[in-house]
Image (spheres, rainbow, N blue to C red):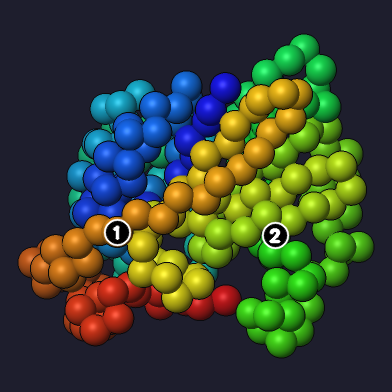
């Protein structure tokens, strides 16, 4: 069994199309979207309609909840939400608001072999699961989240793998018997690598393995979309995409 999981599209239609095309070449048995579909990009409605038309299993992200009109978005998201929500129909916002919190793929009858998919963590839509302590030190010269601090988020979870997005950095981390796989993001990379990313999870010989896929896409075309649609901060986004190949306004 092979499961492709992508997350954090954030209104980036160019990146989304590139990832979907690459997923098709891999011929997975199942494709799952792990949340954050519309907010922050220039083409929120087109991204929603593309994913919805494919009838993919999907889970809700924190920005999906905000776009649907629920949750408690931070004040800094106000302008972007006021621009994004009218791009969607009432039915489309209701579809976002009706997405489930999580999904489970069960390769066997034993829950200990399950693959659990959520947006951020098994408890809520916002708290971050960071990379391993070693990788945290490499990224930030400090440990932001020790293994012990994961207990409130992961304690009691029965699964072999937890797959998620939210923090836009591809990584794998072990916590006891649980494998934590951040599938990374289609848009706004947090690791400085401009490519869109997703993960392939494979069940074979009684265990799961994970591979991160990195996909080039036309960032100049996405910059043009920002210039054409002009969402809040469009000038900053277009300039960053043209100069650096990526845009991430809220780095961790």
Q: Is residue 63 above or below residue 55?
A: below
Q: Residue furthest top?
A: 109
Q: Name the quadrant containing residue 114.
A: top right
Task: Please give the name of the residue rendered at 20% of the width and 79% of the height, measured from the top-left corner.
Answer: 242
Callout 2: 10 Å neighbours few (<14), some, many (20+)? many
Callout 1: 10 Å neighbours few (<14), some, many (20+)? some
Residue 88: x, y in percent?
24, 45
Image quarter hosting the N terminus: top right
Task: Please give the name of the residue rendered at 35% of the width and 24% of the height, measured from the top-left corner.
Answer: 55
Q: Is residue 205 above or below residue 158?
A: above
Residue 109: x, y in percent?
77, 12
Q: Residue furthest bottom?
A: 141
* Residue topped by disc 2: 129
Q: Is residue 133 above or below residue 3?
A: below
Label drawn at residue 216 = 1
Q: Secondary structure at mark 2?
A: loop
Residue 35: x, y in percent?
48, 45
Q: Is residue 242 visible?
A: yes
Task: Please give the name of the residue rendered at 38% of the width and 48% of the height, measured from the top-left corner.
Answer: 37
Q: Camera-side residue: 238 or 192? A: 192
Image quarter hosting the C terminus: bottom right
Q: Secondary structure at mark 1?
A: loop
Rounded to the nearest angstrom, the CA distance separating label 1 from label 2 is 26 Å
Numbered disc in front, either 1 or 2? 1
Task: Please give the name of the residue rendered at 11% of the width and 68% of the height, measured from the top-left corner.
Answer: 224
């Amino acid at each position: 069994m092979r499961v492709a999981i992508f997350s954090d599209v954030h209104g980036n239609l160019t990146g989304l199309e590139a990832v979907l095309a690459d997923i098709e070449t891999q011929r997975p048995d199942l494709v799952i979207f792990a949340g954050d579909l519309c907010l922050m990009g220039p083409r929120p409605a087109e991204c929603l309609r593309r994913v919805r038309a494919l009838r993919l299993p999907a889970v809700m992200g924190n920005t999906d909840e905000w776009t649907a009109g629920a949750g408690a978005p931070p004040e800094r998201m106000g302008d972007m939400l006021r621009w994004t929500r009218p791009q969607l129909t009432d039915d489309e916002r209701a579809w976002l608001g009706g997405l489930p919190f999580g999904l489970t793929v069960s390769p066997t009858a034993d829950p200990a072999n399950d693959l659990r998919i959520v947006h951020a963590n098994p408890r809520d839509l916002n708290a971050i699961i960071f990379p391993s302590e070693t990788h945290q030190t490499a990224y930030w010269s400090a440990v932001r989240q020790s293994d012990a601090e994961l207990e409130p988020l992961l304690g009691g979870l029965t699964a072999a793998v937890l797959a998620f997005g939210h923090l836009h950095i591809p990584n794998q981390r072990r916590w006891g018997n649980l494998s934590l796989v951040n599938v990374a993001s289609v848009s706004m990379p947090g690791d400085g690598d401009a490519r869109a990313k997703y993960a392939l999870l494979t069940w074979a010989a009684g265990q799961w393995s994970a591979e991160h896929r990195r996909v080039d896409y036309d960032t100049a075309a996405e910059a043009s979309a920002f210039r054409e649609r002009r969402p809040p901060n469009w000038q900053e986004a277009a300039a960053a995409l043209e100069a650096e190949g990526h845009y991430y306004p809220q780095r961790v």
